[in-house]
Image (cartoon, helix red, strand yellow):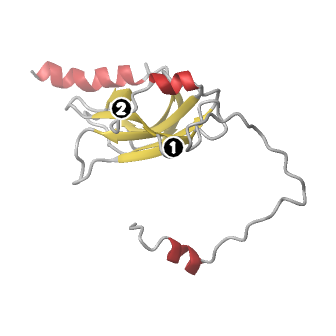
Amino acid sequence: MKKIALLAPILALALSGCDNNEVGDVSLGLFTTKDIKINILVDPIVTGVTCHVASIEANLDLSDPSDSAISCRQTGEITPQMIAAIDDSKSGEIVFKKSKSIFFKTMKIRRIFDKSSQTLMYISYSTKETSGSYKHSLSTVPLWDTLAYKSTDGSANHTHHHTITPAQQTTPTPPTVGEAAEKNSDVAY
């Protein structure tokens, strides 16, 4: 049993360099074994969406912190065939998962399709409660102006890039703090 306890940190360190999806690595300091790792994920079905996930990894610890951040963007074409192939239930489907601990903690990324707003939502979350909370982060990719977009009447979006003349252009005035607070008065932060 002692041999396993001694080998676990060494194995974790060896495997930490094996992630071929890693595109960034930020050290948190000279006297820590924790780094911010940035990984890239291309949605396996909706291949026109790329997500970047940042999370803290501790090379010599048995457990990684649960915090993560996700940012997803349209980086290619999104077609109606891709949207038809995804799970459109309210719980969506897992598109990526990564072990964050030898103690059964996993970071998962789930894709959920919001039909009413024609938006793909990607949620990154930890499967183990930490400090009384399940850590999570959300990013959205609207389908507007893609081949997959459908208007509220169900028709496909066939119009792209409307020409706007300089006379039609207007610069919106940003709301004051009071106006914004009034508009969002029912939102809890």
Q: Would residue 121 appear left or right of 104 to someone viewing this image?
A: right
Q: Residue at x 31, y 24 (%)?
A: 12
Residue 177 in the image: above or below residue 133: below
Q: Give the vertical position of 119 relative to 41 (above or below).
A: below
| Kind of residue at disc 1 | Thr
If the image is split into quadrants, where does the N terminus sit? top left
**Hey, which residue is sitting farthest bottom in the picture?**
178
Nearer to us of marks 1 and 2 is 1
Farthest residue, direction right: 166
- Of residues 100 and 164, which is closer to you in this image? 164
Q: Is residue 125 left or right of residue 42?
A: left
x, y percent for residue 63: 26, 36
User: Label 1 to label 2, Cα distance in Å?
Assistant: 31 Å
* Residue 158 position within the rendered picture, expressed as x and y whole percent measured from the top left: 70, 33
Numbered circle sitting on residue 140: 1
Left of 189 or right of it: where is 80? Answer: right
43 or 71, which is in the foreground? Answer: 43
Quadrant housing the C terminus: bottom left
